[in-house]
Amino acid sequence: MSQLSEASVSLDYKKDVQNHINTIHASAQFTLAETQGGLHLQNLFFVIQI
């Protein structure tokens, strides 16, 4: 069994990702989580090229 590597993604606290109460917007958090999940799945599976 191969050892899985760990990776992390982060989001800078900038005005572009803040909502009207100056916290990180839910859409930005969701996008960050989806990105991390995609990277994790990409590391789990691989394509055998013929």
Image: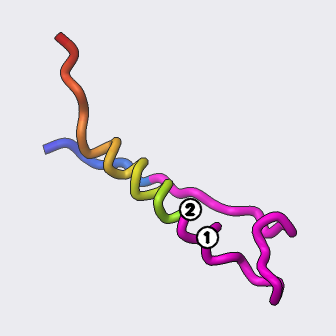
Front residue of 25/39: it is 25
Dot placed on the residue nearer the N-terminal end, 2 or 1: 1
Element at badge 2? helix
Q: Badge 1 local density, few (<14 within 10 Å), some, or many (20+)?
A: few
Q: Residue at x 22, y 15 (%)?
A: 49
Front residue of 19/11: it is 19
Residue 18, picture quadrant: bottom right
Does 24 sit left or right of 21 as displayed? left
Residue 25, picture quadrant: bottom right
Label of residue 43 in the image? none
Q: Position of residue 30 (x, y in %)?
A: 54, 69
Badge 2 amino acid? Leu
Which residue lies under the disc numbered 1? 27
Q: Which residues are magenta?
A: 7-31
Which residue lies under the disc numbered 2? 32
Name of the residue lying farthest toward the top: 50
Q: Position of residue 11 (x, y in %)?
A: 69, 62
Residue 37, picture quadrant: bottom left
Q: Residue at x 63, y 61 (%)?
A: 10
Name of the residue lying farthest toward the left: 1
Q: Verify whether residue 42 appears in magenta.
A: no
Q: Position of residue 12 (x, y in %)?
A: 76, 63
The answer to whether 1 is drawn above or below residue 37 in the figure is above
Element at badge 1? helix
Q: Residue at x 76, y 83 (%)?
A: 23
Badge 1 amino acid? Ser
